[in-house]
Image (cartoon, rainbow, N blue to C red):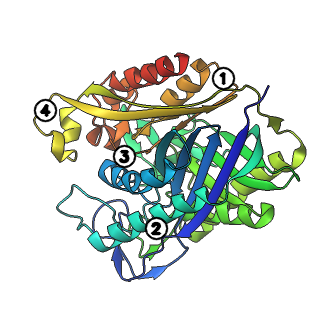
Amino acid sequence: MSVSLHLGTAVVNTTPQTLPVVTNGMGPGNVAKSVESDLEIRGFTFASGDQAFTLLTCDILYVDAEAAADIESRIRPEAEKYWKKWDFFITASHTHWAPVLFTNSVRVPENPEYRAFFIERATVCAAETFGNMEPVTLELGKTFCRMNINRRAIVNGTSFMQPVHPEFTFAAVDRPVDHEVVVSAARRADGSFKGILVNWNCHPICFPIHYDAVSSCFVGRTMTELRKKYGCVCGYTNAALGNAAPLLGLQGAESKDLVADDLTAKVSALLDSGAMRKNIGDEFSTQRWEVTVKCYPPGMTYCFKQFWGKETAPVPLGMFRIGNWLAGLVPCECFAELAMDFKKRAGVGFAQICSLTNGSSGYMVAKGEFRYGGYEPSVALCAPGEPEKIIDSLLEHIRR
């Protein structure tokens, strides 16, 4: 027996209205003077009986916990008119070429104007999903896109990050990477698509470190192409740590289009092949909770100002499950080996990690990776071994 399911969808534009604008780039000093591609928030509200949850997928580097809470508080009164239990999740694509939403760095100025605009647009998007709920059936499938790499190349016992050091690209070919793409597609009674969600292990970092335009990177192009083809809102959730491979030395729009076209082709082939499977199981559940982790002081010298001098910190977690589809939600950038371990142990046919959801707590660095140093441990809130405890906490709540 399958769960009785309704879905509402919406998409709003979040391209900055004023240029130039400071973007996150990959470090300070990035100013966008033009728009390479629009930014969007794509919203999905799933409901069964008196329960529902809203998932907003956003073209942004990350949504900090305070902004996520602000958006939720604005939406909740309306949501509770429809459902007794409602949860809220907002997740970032991690494009580096969107305006700054929040920063702890004195070298990157905050942008209160864009922050207010983003929060208002996110609220509008969520509310619009409530207004077009329709009965749907859910189909699930998996495919593979090999346009991603483990960005931590290990050379002589030291980590070098891609694409900052493209000369070491092929030093990372044997490192852990998850090429699996999980696709969730909702159909109306007439067979047309109501909404599609794509989960893949790849950050949108296709442009040079210093780039002077706003861009949604390969995520925006992929979602736009899928929306054109299937006539529905399509969203992207970031599975874990990975980068688009800088193939043939390409960077910028060429690299973005190369990745987007391949991912679009792989998802389209899955949807068109008849290989998608109807969701089974009548479970519809969501949970949110916090775990307390030991802090990693070297990482906290760079960010997490609110936890300076503290030995522990709270990390918000969540999960949702619809039948045979399960997502573990973390506010961190999860290393691929951790995400793959979660999927292997989840005991559900279609399991996925959604990174950078309801906040940003730096990197979830696998325990064995700290010895290589590099960038990621320098912005890790969680001390060695704590990310593995987060995965255990996700699995424990799933088993409940």
The disc label shown at residue 121, or none: 2
Q: Looking at the image, tell me whether mark 2 or mark 3 is earlier in sequence order.
A: 2
* Mark 3 crowd level (few <14, some 14–19, many ≥20, 10 Å Cα): many
- Residue located beneath label 1 in the image: 348
Q: Quadrant of residue 177?
A: top right
Disc 3 + disc 1, Cβ < 8 Å: no
Badge 2 or badge 1: first in the primary sequence: 2
- Numbered mark located on residue 359 in the image: 3
Report whether 248 appears left or right of 289: right
Between the residue at mark 1 and the residue at mark 4, the CA separation in whole angstroms equals 37 Å
What percent of the width, then of the height, locates residue 75?
A: 44, 55
Give the distance between the C-alpha atoms of the residues marked 3 and 1, in whole angstroms.
26 Å
Disc 2 element: helix
Q: Earlier in the sequence, mark 4 or mark 2?
A: 2
Could you tell me if the residues under marks 1 and 4 are in contact, i.e. CB atoms within 8 Å?
Answer: no
Using the image, determine if residue 51 lies above or below residue 57: above
Q: Amino acid at mark 1?
A: Val
Callout 3–callout 4 Cβ contact below 8 Å:
no
Instruction: Judge from the rendering whether residue 192 lies leftward or rightward of residue 315; answer left or right.
Output: right
Which label belongs to residue 310? Answer: 4
In the structure shown, which secondary structural element does the residue marked by tag 1 occupy?
loop
Q: Label 4 sits on what residue type?
A: Lys
Disc with the residue nearer the chain's start (3 vs 4): 4
Measured in 3D between alpha carbons, the distance from the residue under mark 2 to the one under mark 3, in whole angstroms, is 18 Å
**Foreground tag (3 vs 4):** 3
Along the viewing direction, whichever of 283 and 176 lies nearer the viewer? 283
Give the total number of marks visible in the rendering. 4
**Residue at image x 40%, y 25%?**
390
Q: Say left or right for 211 vs 185.
A: left
Q: Of the residues tagged 2 and 3, which is closer to the observer?
A: 2
